[in-house]
Amino acid sequence: MARLKFVRHCHNCKAKFHPWRRSKSNRFCSRRCFDLGRVLTIDERTWSTSVDGYKIMTEAPPHPMLSPGRQLLQHWYVLYESSSDKDKLMELREQGATVHHRNGKRHDNRLRNLTIRLPSEHPKGTSEEDAILLLRALGYTVSK
């Protein structure tokens, strides 16, 4: 099969290369650059929506908030990246804490819409004051 005549630039090493076929998926010059490009950043990746309505990334690069199935839930990612006490957040997750979306929209992962709840609190809900205390304990700045 003959190579096409146009040239692309590798998204990882910026080298010029001739892709085998014209496709938007041809972004890397080699398998090595493809593998390195997958690990570079999470922010540039696309998030898909799960059946349950959560934003997820399947086959995500290594990250402390990965689930056992190598899926990264965007709400945990947002909380982890904005937390000043990442170890405390990891402890809460290991204890079975869940992320609650205040407005009920599972795809709305703005920091002000997310609260952390322990298993005993999540079914019943919690007061606004308790949520503010918990967020402040995790290092977030909260204003009323």
Image (cartoon, rainbow, N blue to C red):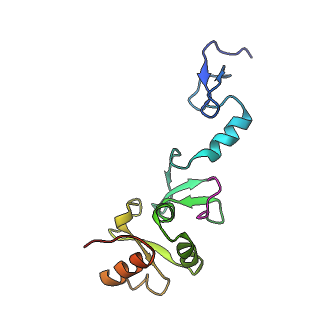
In the rendered image of this protein, does residue 37 appear above or below residue 27? below
What percent of the width, then of the height, locates residue 12? 63, 34
Q: Is residue 11 magenta?
A: no
In the rendered image of this protein, does residue 84 appear above or below residue 122? above
Q: Is residue 1 visible?
A: yes
Q: Give the residue at x 73% y 37%.
A: 32
Q: Give the residue at x 32% y 68%.
A: 103
> In front: 7, or 142?
142
Magenta-colored segment: predominant secondary structure: loop
What percent of the width, then of the height, locates residue 14? 61, 28
Q: Give the residue at x 41% y 80%.
A: 134
Q: Give the residue at x 65% y 15%.
A: 4
> In front: 42, or 22?
42
What percent of the width, then of the height, locates residue 7? 61, 17
Q: Is residue 63 magenta?
A: yes
Q: Is residue 105 visible?
A: no
Task: Classify residue 112 by image quadrant.
Answer: bottom left
Q: Is residue 39 left or right of residue 42?
A: right
Task: Classify residue 87 by image quadrant.
Answer: bottom right
Q: Is residue 80 left or right of residue 6?
A: left
Q: Is residue 94 left or right of residue 142?
A: right
What percent of the width, then of the height, locates residue 127? 32, 84
> Image quadrant for the C terminus?
bottom left
Look at the image and give the residue range highlighted in magenta.
59-66
Q: Residue furthest top?
A: 5
In the rendered image of this protein, does residue 23 appear above or below residue 92? above
> Image quadrant for the N terminus?
top right
Q: How many marks?
A: 0
